[in-house]
Image (cartoon, grey):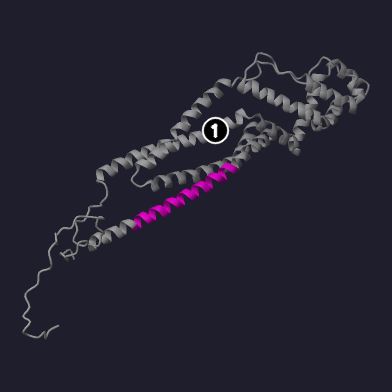
Amino acid sequence: MGQPTSSVYLDASQPVRGPAPKAVRNIRRTLAGWLTLVGLLALSATALLGGIHLVTTNPGTLVEAANKTLDDPVVQQELDREMASAIETRLLDLDMSQSATSIGFIVADEALRLAPIILADAAFRSELETLIIAAHDQILLNPSELPIDITAMTKVVIDVIESESPQFAQMLPRDHQLYEITTDSLPDFTGPVSLLERVLLLTALATLALPLAGLLHPHYDQILTWIGRWALLAGLVAALAAIALPKVVGAATGFHAAEIAAQTVTTRLLGPAALAGMIGMGLVTVASVRAKRRHNETSDYGEARALGLHEPDRFSTPRNNLTGPPKHDPVDVSHPLTNI
């Protein structure tokens, strides 16, 4: 092994194909590691802030939550009591209520009977959606000094009462409102929402550290492994949040309606959670295959170097310049060849 063989190819100068210096590789690994950390933190912040931004800027999510809340049997009992209380205390005068009681008309029982009919009315549902969209816009997007108008919703409630209980409708004054929503009673989150959009843009740009880390690291498959594991963890956390967060909201507020509304919103996390899990599994698999192939290539290269079987460069210059005919000892033709 390693001795001249008089072959142009085998005796050619062999290139050195070893890895980059160890110090350079360590620097690249360190920088790539920090970039990956920054990128994964930015990706986590982008996912969280993106979900919050989607809920805060899309009133359709709140409308869907309200409709599902109204359809829940347990929530309906809670809302029936709230609606009956609003009818008795807001739409009806105290004097009129006492007069009705004196003639044997129980206002509380009649209001409780009418409450589920009102909540199931299609016109009331439509006005409720309009109210939610208006409140969402005023609280989160476009602040206003004007109070939210409840006149249309009050008219729908009175129309239902007139059709279901004409005697009770005669007791209702026409200048009262079912609810009163003033500007002071509404919070103003337009500033935080605007700041959220700017921060979301910055975190999204910071995720570009991940492809930079992949380009800088000597073995980009390790970056894919880290990203894949992060995606698996993010999917698991999102799935757990979709299950546990509604329970936490319900326990904190004491209202089953709040739990149902939160469940409607967090259910949308299950799709992204499953997608993140599939992406994570795919990236981990690709990184594992790439790492195994790299390990095999490294092993084959090491064995070839040890045995002296590594290939030379193409079109390399031969070590020995063999331009003349081969030299042999003279042969005496007078003696026959006896040792062929």
Please tell me which residue lies in front, 332 or 70: 332
Report the front residue among 62 and 173: 62
In the drawing, does residue 90 fall left or right of residue 317?
A: right
Left or right side of 288 for 12: left
Q: Is residue 278 magenta?
A: yes
Q: Quadrant of the C terminus?
A: bottom left
Q: Which residue is mark 1?
A: 50
Residue 335 horizontal/vertical position (percent):
6, 85
Compare residues 289 and 63 and report the one nearer the observer: 289
**Identity of the residue furthest to the right in this view:** 103
Q: Is residue 167 above or below residue 306?
A: above
- Residue at position x 76%, y 38% in the image: 73
Q: State whether residue 107 is above or below residue 304.
A: above
* Residue 82 covered by magenta stretch: no
Residue at horizontal 81%, vertical 16%? 176
Q: Is 335 placed left or right of 158 in the picture? A: left
Q: Horizontal placement of 333 versus 271: left or right? A: left
- The quarter of the rendered structure image containing the N terminus is bottom left
Q: Secondary structure at mark 1?
A: helix
Position of residue 4 measured from the top left corner of the image (x, y, whole percent): 15, 64
Residue at the location (72% across, 24% down)?
A: 131
Which residues are the magenta region?
Answer: 271-296
